[in-house]
Image: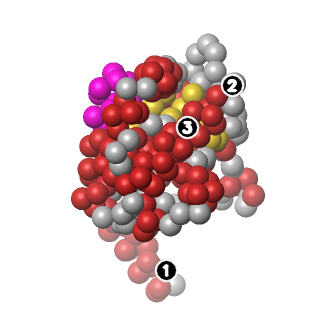
Amino acid sequence: MDGPIRIYLVGAHSTGKTTLARWIRDRYGLPMISEVARGVLAEMEAKLETLRTDLELVSSYQAQVFERQLQAERAQQGSFVSDRAFCNLAYAAQHSLLSPEVFSDGRLQRYMADVREGIVFYLRPHQELLAEDGVRERGDWEEVLRIDGMVKLMLEMYAIPYLPVASLPMQERARTVEGSLSLAGLQPRVPQRRYLSHVGPLQAEAPQPRGGNGLVHQLQSSEA
């Protein structure tokens, strides 16, 4: 694959995007763009409870989050992995008055065109992963499903090719990502650790008698 490789993980909150992004970062030696929402929230000195009730504040917050995401990606000239992309706009549509302004902004069109050229993994929700993270909504399954649906709608609206990650075990998620990136021509830079090399070679065990002959052998041994 020629040129920089941009990898995006999108989906609702509590879907394991950050965990998987960190694994990709470490496995492939890529810079990682971390979620910017927490930084914006801290700078605004706002609390999660306030964002749920103050429409003006939440609109300002979501606008700044989107702007900060654009800045973070522009600052990375080469390849990267990001545990977010346009995801906060799904929350903006659900909780703010920002949507008409954002969706008429030419920067969004250009940004989605850039995302379309990247590799997008769409993480599907699992109730087992629900957790309060201090930034997003509470562990409300219905809310997660609504945001998940909005993210999918945006993927389809902007014709962004994506690879769904529907499994829950991290092992299966890693295999899905590794296989997909291999097809895209991206190979791991950090080899898997060889844990067995630290404990020496495995010793072959002597074969044990099986079935009726084994029982006869045991009886003969006990009589000797």
Q: CA distance from mark 3 to mark 2?
A: 20 Å
Badge 3, how many Cα within 10 Å: few under 14, some, many 20+?
few
- What amino acid does circle 2 point to? Gly
Badge 1, how many Cα within 10 Å: few under 14, some, many 20+?
few
The residue to which callout 1 is attached is 221
Residue numbers of the magenta segment? 151-166
Residue 165 within the magenta-colored segment of the rendering: yes
Residue 151: image x %, image y %?
34, 39
Taking depth in this image into account, of 185 and 11 the one nearest to the observer is: 11
First-in-chain label (3 vs 2): 3
Residue 77 in sight here: yes
- What amino acid does circle 1 point to? Ser
Residue drawn where x is 73% and y is 53% of the image? 197
Q: CA distance from mark 2 to mark 1?
A: 70 Å
Q: Please tell me in which quadrant of the rendered image residue 100 appears.
A: top left
Taking depth in this image into account, of 179 and 221 the one nearest to the observer is: 179
Residue drawn where x is 31% and y is 55% of the image? 144
- What amino acid does circle 3 point to? Glu
Residue 66 within the magenta-colored segment of the rendering: no
**Vertical order, 177 against 211 (above or below):** above
The residue to which callout 3 is attached is 67
Residue drawn where x is 58% and y is 57% of the image? 44
Of badges 2 and 1, nearer the viewer stands 2
The residue to which callout 2 is attached is 78
Residue 128: image x %, image y %?
35, 64
Residue 215: image x %, image y %?
37, 74
SS at mark 3 in the image: helix
Cβ–Cβ under 8 Å for marks 3 and 2:
no
Instruction: Describe residue 126's horizontal placement relative to residue 84 as left or right.
Output: left
